[in-house]
Image (cartoon, rainbow, N blue to C red):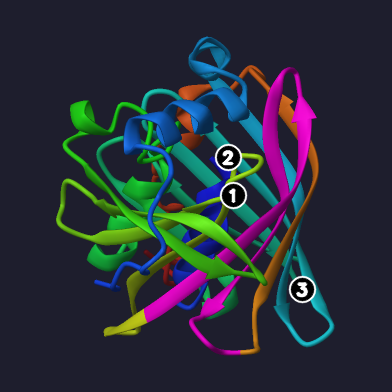
Amino acid sequence: MFRKLALCSFVLLLSGAAATAVAADLTLDQILAKNIQARGGMEKLKAVKSMRMTGKMTVGPGMEAPITLIEKRPHNMRLEFSLQGMTGVQAYDGKSGWTIMPFQGKKDAEPMAEDDLKDAEEQADFDGPLVDYKEKGNKVELMGKDAVEGGEAYKLKVTLKNGDVRYIYIDPDSFLEIKTEGKRTIRGADQEVESTIGDYKEVEGLMIPFSMQAGMKGSPQKQSITIDKVEINPTVDDSVFKMPAAAPAPAADKKPGA
């Protein structure tokens, strides 16, 4: 859900590490079980069929864009963001992805580029890569503990079914995700991207982060995302995820005497 949004939106808008010497005091299965329980438990997670989040995202110095993220099982995602009176859209319907980018003079929907499509597919994983990871074809490894924001966190290496690698950091007290890292292809080049996750709040029995920051690893410049409202199981028609047809071209004027 939203824990993936900062990484994904950062990449779309811009269109292995060694384990520490500190030994883990819990097994991987125990950490994953505690993470699921901390998020609200498997039953509550699976009871969520759709989710709508609204908030704002920084897109430049002193500039914010209202955003709306809609997700629906099994693999549907739609992100809208408004800027300068125009609204951009990035969506995935479980098979194909598309965008509307009026800021670039493109008012009609267009298929996503291959790299953006991979990110959209990852975003559309409703429960995230840790839940039912084996059934999804993912591989998860416990890499011990690592330093995060002045403390320590469990470091999990996640190899997705497509071969991409992500690192997810789990707080040892709350067992919630507090940081993610991974390589993303941005403008044709692989970049190390990281996000920090926080301000968790309870929404209908689920713990959901309301704040994230994402950017290039090691860079002080980060894109911030703040969520104002979360709706659980709103009614969402599947059509919002489908790529709309292009607007018909204006009819040519008839010549005199035709």
Residue 128 to residue 134: above or below? below
Image label count: 3
Q: Which residue is mark 3?
A: 84
Q: Which residue is mark 1?
A: 171
Query: Which of pointers 2 and 3 lies earlier in the amino acid sequence?
Result: 3
Q: Which residue is mark 2?
A: 175
Kindly identify the amino acid type of the residue bearing the numbered disc 2: Phe
Neighbours of disc 3 within 10 Å: few (<14), some (14-19), many (20+): few
Q: Residue at x 43, y 23 (%)?
A: 73
Give the image location of residue 16, x and y in percent.
24, 71
Give the image location of residue 211, x and y in percent.
73, 55
Kindly identify the amino acid type of the residue bearing the numbered disc 1: Asp
C-beta proximity under 8 Å, tags 2 and 1: yes
Q: Residue at x 20, y 26 (%)?
A: 135
Q: Which quadrant of the figure contains the C terminus?
A: bottom left
Which labelled disc corresponds to residue 13? none
Q: Residue at x 38, y 60 (%)?
A: 167
C-beta proximity under 8 Å, tags 2 and 3: no
Q: Residue at x 47, y 28 (%)?
A: 239
Residue 195 to residue 159: above or below? below
Q: Nearer the viewer, residue 58 or 43?
A: 43
Give the image location of residue 203, x and y in percent.
76, 26
Left or right for 231, reference 169? right
